[in-house]
Structures are given as C-alpha cells and as structure tokens.
Image: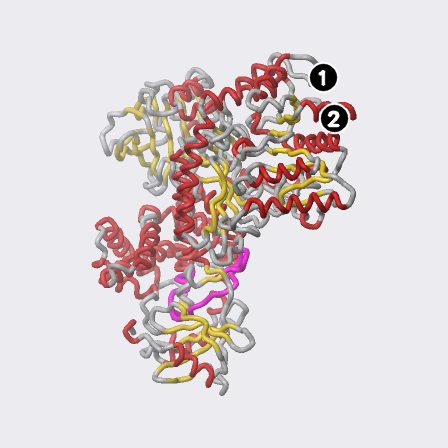
Amino acid sequence: MNISTCPTFSKEEALTVLKIEWGITEILKPLDSYLDQNFLVRNSNGEKFVLKIANIETPESWLDLQNKVVEHLYADAIPKIILSNEGKQMIFVASHWWRVLNFLEGTMLSTVPFRSKDLLQNMGKFVGGLSKQLATFSHEAAERPIQWDLQQSASLLENWVTFVEDEKTKNSILSIMENWKTKIPAISKVRKSVIHADLTRYNLLLDDSGEKIQGIIDFGDVCHSWTIGELAVMVLESAMTGSPTPFADAYEVIQSYHEVFPLTKEEINILYPLIQLRSATIVGASARQLSMEPDNEYVQKQAIADREMFHQLSSEKEEFATDLFRKACKMESEESLNIQHFLETAKIKSIFENNEILNIIDISPSSEIYNEGAWNNLEQCRKNIKNQLENGFGRAVYKTPVLKPFESNPRESETIALGIFAFAPAGTTICAPVDLTFVNKIEDKSIFKTDSFYIYFYEIESNIEIGTIIKQGEPLGTISAENLNSPFPSLVFIQVDSSGVAPQFCLPSESIGWGILSPDPSAFLGMESKITTNNNETETLENRRAKVIQQAQEYYYQEPMNLVRGWQQYLIADDGRVYLDAINNVAHIGHSHPKVVDAATKQLRKLNTNARFLYEDNIDYAERLLKYFPESLQVIFYTCTGSEANDLALRLARAYTNQNDVLVIDGEYHGNTTAVDEISTNLMDNPTASKSVRPFTHPLIQPNTFRGKYAADTPNVSELYAKDAQDKIANIQSQGRGVAAFISESLLGSGGGVEMPKDYLKKVYEHVHKGGGVCIADEVQIGFGRMGSHFWGFQKEGVLPDIVTLGKPMGNGHPISAVITTQKIADAYRKKYTYFNTFAGNPVSCQIANAVLDVIEEEKLQENAAIVGNFLKQELEKLIDEFESVGAVYGHAMYLGVDLVTDKKSRKPDSQKALWISEAMKQRGIIIYPTGDYYNILKIKPPMCFTKENATFLVETLRAILGKMEG
C-alpha cells in the first residue's frame, strides 16, 4: 500500500455519496490522512462525523478488523461506526470502501505543552484498560504485516538506517539494532495480543482541562503483536517525546498502567529496548521521507523533536531505565538487593585510616554557605565550608542537591550528587573499605571494583596500576590539592555504582532511577545512612500546608516547587533547580540584596519600635522620598502594605470630599481589605466581583484597545473611553451625590499590563476634578522606576494625582508602604480622624526602604528597566506575527503582558492555554503566570535587575512552547 493509491474524491463527489448512503448533507473540511481520504462532515441536526474513504489497496478484512475492534471497545472515548441507510458498516463505491464514524471532540495531546502528573497517571490507566480489554479480542486479519508493528521494526531499519546522514545518529541506531539482536530470546517470552499500536500524541484527545483522555482515534495500525508494545509506543510518543522530564513522565505512566494491567518481569526487562527500537524506527522513517521530500517542513519539524528524544535514549541508560520501570511496578532487581544486603551486613572499614569523626555539613541549596551570592563566588563558598569543618573534616549527606550558577537552558541541570562529599585536608590518605581491584582512572575519577559493583573515588591522587588488587585497609591514594575552580575545599567524593555507567550527578527528575544503581555509600565512611528528603519534601509541604493554612489562597502551579533561596532575579528550589523569576515585582531590586540584608540587620541590632516614638529614620526617608514627587505632594502617611495604602487613600478622599462614591477601572485590583475589596473588580483576585459591586462603586469601561469597546485606530479613542467617566459622574450627581475619588493604576497591572490610550488618564482626571472628586494614582505595582522612562507611572501619563499609593516594592518585599498626598487633604483628614499604624514606618523598615532607593540609583535600575524592558517588549511583539495564539503584547518597560487567544479573528481569551504555557515554562526554568479577568494574559514583571540575556531566554522558550502547540 502506498500514497499513490490514496483516494482523491472531490468534495462534491463525496457529498453525493454521503447524501445517498447516510443522509448527511454537509462537508465541513478535509482532514489529514497519509494513505486514506478523510472529511469532517455534518448532518442537518448539526452532529459531526468523519467520512473515511479507504486506500484502494486496503483489503476489506483489514477494515473489518478496525470495525470489530471499535465495537469490542465500545465506550465514549472510542469512535462509533455510523450505519448507512441500509444498515451497513461500510459500503463499496467507485472501487473504494467508505465508512462514517462519529466525530470525537477534544484537544489533541500534541498541542498541549504540559503533561501534569494527573494526566500522565490517567494516560497509564486508560491504556492499561485498553490492553486489558483487547487481551480477550481476536480477529484473523490481525496477523497482517504492517509497517508500524514493532515486530517489523528491526527488518525495516536495515534499510531505513541508510537514509540517515548524521553519523552520530546513524551509529546510535546501529548500536540499538545490535543490542536488539541480544533481546530476541527474551522477546519470545512476552505476551502477545491485538493492540492499537499507534497511541501517539496525535491520536489521543484530552478533555478541556487537559487532565484526562476523552478519546482515541485512528485504528489503522491495529495488529496482533507484543502486548508490551502498546505501552512502549505510548510511553515514547505520548509521554516522553517533547517532555523536559521524559523518564519521570514515563515512570508515572508505567506505574498507573501496571495498576490496571500488571506487567510481567520479562515485559519490564524488554520495555526500554522496545522504546529505543521504536524511536530508532521513527528517526529512520523521517530520514527516508526527507530523502524523497527534502522541502517538507512538517516532516523536518517532527524529525527534530524525534531526534532530540532519540539521543536521550542511549544504551548506557538501559539499566537505569529498567530499574526505574521496575520501581514503578514495585519490583527490584536481584543486583540492587544484593548490593543493599552487602552494604548492611558486610564488615566494612572507613576510608579514613584514623576513623575520623565527620560532622554533617549542609551544602544543599538552603545552606548558609551560599548566602549573599557566595554560590557565584567560588573562593567565598570554599571559605564558608571550611569555617564549618572540624579539624578540616566533615561530610555532606547522600544525594545532596548542589547549587550551580544559572544557565539560560530550558533543561534541568544535573544537581543531585549520587554519592557523598567527604571533606578532608589535602594529602589525607584514603584506604580501601573492602577488597578492591583498580580498574581505571578517567580525569579525577578513580574506578575500583568489588566482586559485584563499582566504587568511584573522585579527587584522589594515586599511582596504582590497572588490575592491582588492594586489600581492605590498604591505601588507595591521597586527597588532591584544593581545586580553585570548585566551590568546595579539598575532598574525596565516594560513589557506589552497580552499572558502571552512573554519572556523578544526575537530573532531579532521574534521581529515583539512578539512586537504585548508586545506593548510599555511608557505610564506607563508617557511618549510618543520612539520606536527604528533598525528593519528597515538596509533597510533604503541600500536605502540611493543606492542614494548617487556609486554602482560599492558592499557590502557583499544579506541582509547586519547594523554594529555599532567592538571589537577584533567580529563585532556587530544594533540588538545586535555579528558576528565572519573571513575575516577582515585589522583590523590586532583586531577591536577597546584600544592601537590604545589611540595612535590616544593622538596624535590628539598634532599634525597632512603633511610630509614636520620635526617631530620625522615618523622617530621613520621608524627606528623601518626597524629592521624587511634584511639590504639591508633600505629606507622607506610612503603611505596611499596598492594601493598607489604598484603604487609607480612600479614607483620605472621603474625608476631604465628604462623599462616598468611587470610580474605578473595570478589571483592576487594589487590595484585600474590606474597603478596597469593595472597589476591586478583577475577577482573578475577586471572583465574585461582577456580582458584588457596591452601589458606591462605579467601574469604568477598561480602556483596552485590543479587546475593549473601541480599537486603537478608532478616531478620538481616548475621548470615547473617558466619556464613560463623564457619564457615570453625571449619573451619580443626578441622584444627589458626589464623587469622592477615582482610583487607578497608570498602567493597568491587574489587567495584564495594559497601556491606556494617550491622554485617556488626563481626560478622566479632568472629569473627576470637575465633578469635585480627587484622583488616586495606585503605584503599588508599577512605581519606583519600573516604567523606565519615568520614576512613577503617573508621570508617564502626564497627570498630577491628589494622592499616590505605594506598596511593598518600596521595601523590596519588606512590609513597608506609603500614601503621599497634599497638605490640604492631610489637614482635612486630621480634622476628623487620627491615624496610627503600629509598625508602619518603623526604623528597620525605613532603613530597608532607604537601601532600596540607594540600589535603584547606584545600579541604574530605572535605566535598566527602560533598556531591557523595551527590548523584551519588542521581542515579544514578534510573536504576534508568528503565532495565532498571541493576540497582543501589553505594557511598558518592566511591566508587560502577553494576551493569549484561541484565534486572532475572534480574540476569544484562552485561559487554558495560558495555564498550560505557564506550567510548561516552569518545567523549563522560568516563572511566569496568567492574570486578567479571563486568566489568559501572561504577566511579566520581574525584578529590576533582569537582563537582556534573561529576556532572550524567556522569549525563545515561549516561542518554542508556542511552536509545539501550534504544530
């Protein structure tokens, strides 16, 4: 069968047959098919179906096989055969077999960039159920030889490998083919049954949440084959390919599959070689296809993704993968059990001849040795560790995650140490803990072997010849001199390995599998095991939090990371993963800035008390801060949060005007106190906002020229949007009331960073002032230089507010904020009320706030916001032309938003897409999250020290994810 015999009926010809045989009256569009011809069709009731016209060479029995499988698996997730008017499953017209199936709705897995743990587990259970059902099905045509049956792969590769031009790839395929020959006796022992054989990411449909399979399509490759082949194909093509954590994802799928359809030991042993074989076959097939169609962009694109996955399936990983898969099925290899028994029962001596006492030194990412950026300062890091050693000795614990400098790389770094760091003075003798044979030395790695496993010693000097047998207690060598290119002082790193290929460090997502091959070597230090709990810590934290902390406050991400450290524009998790923080505007000048830390600790040693006492700190800061404001704004009220500041601003406005009504911009959020919650209409932070607007709250039409009432090219667009304020003021006054205030950000942060039309804010301010109200500029999120071109957002818009509110970026996240207003308004408030806020403007907070201003000035962060922010926006705007999903890019300088849509024509907000992208970005090391009423705008508001390199990494990662989603 080949493509030259593919049907080529016109829509008119197909419709004629449809009307006569099935009474279906409309063809919507052609659907992709390689060998057959498919159409999406619809009947007069609006129901959708798929017309399938078979290749002229397809035997009737093969189609009957597909029909019978579909009937056998009858379920909502399986297509159903629509009988013709004469009650037939298929009809023979114009030398072709015709069938109609119901159309399954759903999102194709290939367009979803994030596979959650729930989805992976659902995939495993779903396919396990499929295997269970098909185990009892038979059909004489199932024995047919088809190209994509894994039983045919080895023979097909003999030819297809010749089309592979890249020598590395070709040699890897040849190696897999040779390895497969050794598996032939084992494959004869596994079960066989009818399988779907093509459960790829293109044939699985998900529900709207992306958490559950709700349909499978394309039964064209159904055949009688190895039952385990079903799982091999699905794991490779639907779980691993395109995943940043392929083996962890495979683990979840296999574990869930096994719960439904238990695997045998023989099947587990052959699973990884089958995955390799399928991957090699795909690479060979695409190379062959490109030799015939070298300009086929679709095949080129898929070939890249498939090759990337193929090169992660090295032969060296076979033992790792197989042990991981055994673990998923709650089995253990005999080798690992024997090693564990040896380590627990054998008479082992310490590698240190004097049995040194080794205190545990914390070198995990949360350790104090990395404070104040020492993780980027090798000398300082070594010094900090030495200060904790006792007589130069100490040890870390097994599988400690280590902290490495950030790299603009979407993949995980190898941070999990598969052994133990034992610190000791250079020249210290290292002795054999058991009888050993010296095997080899590769760079700083000395390889020894017992009767059943390897032991590696890194960082030792030795003159032993290969093949030498060293008896227990005899010297192996001495610890090398301190490595000045390492963050650690002189040491020996000791590691056990049953495979002979385990790395010194592994990816966090692969630590379970490698940990089986490289168990804890504590016994060789004369100590009991002290295994770190990082692998399960996040899950534990989630459970603990759920028990004691209210659940109304959700956390970012379905599978949140356990953060233990922040530095500059980076956040570090307990597994050593360093994330680029593109969302934390509160950490305005960067996480853990030394000047902030220094200011806080110095002042805490002297004085911290409440604001009713007299001290210079809050006066000095007030005088300094006011220099950044126009002369009319000359009075400061200290508060602790942005919510408090906006709450107080409302009280000031109402006291000054003796009115209560407030104008706000629809979709904005101003805090969580009762007063500001009542005027906030952002559905994300206030889900019932649209139903709970008080009679004194008057939302204005959001001046969003992309999805708002008036587009950017509408004449007098600012006046049209501002007229809404004029009309609402008139309506308030017609009821005998007046306006107290209009409160707004000068760039709509909660709306996704939306910039208002030029002069819009000026016109609204004019209407409000004319109506007797005051104007409040909410600078909580966008102030202190974030706008780049101006220090405050209101300056950028050319307006002069009556009240300005500031938030926690003022203290880099420390609880200090403020309200700045005129003397008249302050006096009016004092005539009616007093103001007291216990720790607002306390000495420590004011010293921190002063340090923040110092850093903004000294490090030229406002200028950086302008340069990097403008560059980032320009790069993001390129995505609008590249992808149908990107509707608009909002914002200014270092406060931006990317509006995601289902399509550009409808501009319908796509909240699910935004969530998937955010999760996928996190998996690739970037923290970003949706905002806006529809939860569809990716907010980008990083610490002000964000760099052009960071911006490029963010955009390129987002581009890659969007590319995979849109195919």
Q: Looking at the rendering, which quadrant does residue 884 occupy?
A: bottom left
Q: Is residue 598 visible?
A: yes
Q: Residue at x 59, y 18 (%)?
A: 621
**Quadrant (top left/top right/bottom left/bottom right) for the N terminus:** bottom left
The mark nearer the N terminus, 2 or 1, is 1
Q: Which residues are magenta?
A: 206-231
Under mark 2, the amino acid is: Tyr
Query: Image check: 555 left or right of 835?
Result: left
Under mark 1, the amino acid is: Arg
Q: Is residue 734 above or below residue 773?
A: below
Q: Is residue 895 above or below residue 196?
A: above
How far across and how far down the image is residue 107, in percent? 49, 60
Q: Secondary structure at mark 2?
A: helix
Residue 829, numbered label: 2
Name the residue that disc number 1 marks: 612
Q: Residue at x 39, y 71 (%)?
A: 220
Q: Residue at x 46, y 47 (%)?
A: 920
Q: Secondary structure at mark 1?
A: loop
How far across and how far down the image is residue 496, in percent? 38, 36
Query: Image check: 340 left or right of 753?
Result: left
Depth check: give the residue in front, 296 or 438. Answer: 296
Whether pointer 2 and pointer 1 mark residues with C-beta atoms closer than 8 Å, the reply is no
The stretch drawn in magenta includes residue 23: no
- Neighbourhood count class around disc 1 (C-alpha, 10 Å): few under 14, some 14–19, many 20 upward: few
Q: Residue at x 56, y 29 (%)?
A: 809
Q: Is residue 156 above or below residue 547?
A: below
Residue 394, numbered label: none
Depth check: give the residue in front, 918 or 936. Answer: 936
